[in-house]
Amino acid sequence: EPEVTQTPSHQVTQMGQEVILRCVPISNHLYFYWYRQILGQKVEFLVSFYNNEISEKSEIFDDQFSVERPDGSNFTLKIRSTKLEDSAMYFCASSSERASNEQFFGPGTRLTVL
Amino acid sequence: GNSVTQMEGPVTLSEEAFLTINCTYTATGYPSLFWYVQYPGEGLQLLLKATKADDKGSNKGFEATYRKETTSFHLEKGSVQVSDSAVYFCALRGGGSSYKLIFGSGTRLLVRP
């Protein structure tokens, strides 16, 4: 069964460093999403991406964040200068068409900023 | 804005007990409603969904009915198993031009043998 994969499973970084979180969506999907969950808090939407551009973003997704689909299979989230408060579990999701409403989630990357 | 409120956990039940996890929502328009489940060490998996009022979503013995009059989408299962132990998230998609999911805070279910 096709699935969304994410690497690494756990990333530890120093405050101020850049990190790139990687996702491989399901191969025939066209819509891609990033969400995050700070420990003990709700899962929050960050950004959606379609046709090589951002289609929607939340207030959390400021200039420190960027997304990219560098090739036909990967979808990345970059945080330019990490802060302590960026420590969270980051989930990637993909969907085949908006009308289906179903987003398939990856297992997440736990980011720890020291 | 749109929001989802879930009952706080953890919920601890004995095997074969009846499960209810409450979920209420606030939304404009006609949202679609979802339950996701997260097993330890895994990602979020769609458990069931309902896209309009009075629809009942069901899967793996779980059910939830979209109640517009009470703005609720409570998750139920008649007889839980140890393997149902997980975190359950209620979520909505507001519709229109937005396709983001808005999640509740999650409810941890622990089923004891």
Image (cartoon, rainbow, N blue to C red):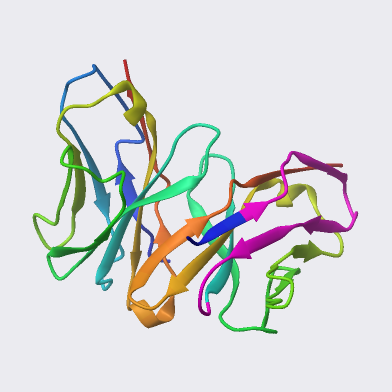
Whether residue B90 appears in magenta in the rendering, the answer is no
Residue A70 position in % (x across, y down): 9, 54
Residue drawn 43% across and 48% down? A44
* Residue A101 drawn above or below residue A59: below
In this picture, residue B13 sits left or right of residue B47? right
The answer to whether B97 appears left or right of A20 in the picture is right
Nearest the viewer among B21 and A21 is B21
The segment highlighted magenta reads B5-30
Residue A2 x %, y %? 38, 65
User: B74 or A25: nearer the eye?
Assistant: B74
Pick whichever, A60 or A79, lies toward us.
Answer: A60
- The image quadrant of residue B72 is bottom right
Judged left or right of residue B11, residue A43 is left
**Looking at the image, can residue A98 be seen?**
yes
| Residue beneath the point at 48% across and 58% down | B102
Residue positioned 31% across, 43% down in the render: A60
Image point (9%, 58%), residue name: A71
Q: Position of residue B52 (x, y in %)?
A: 59, 84
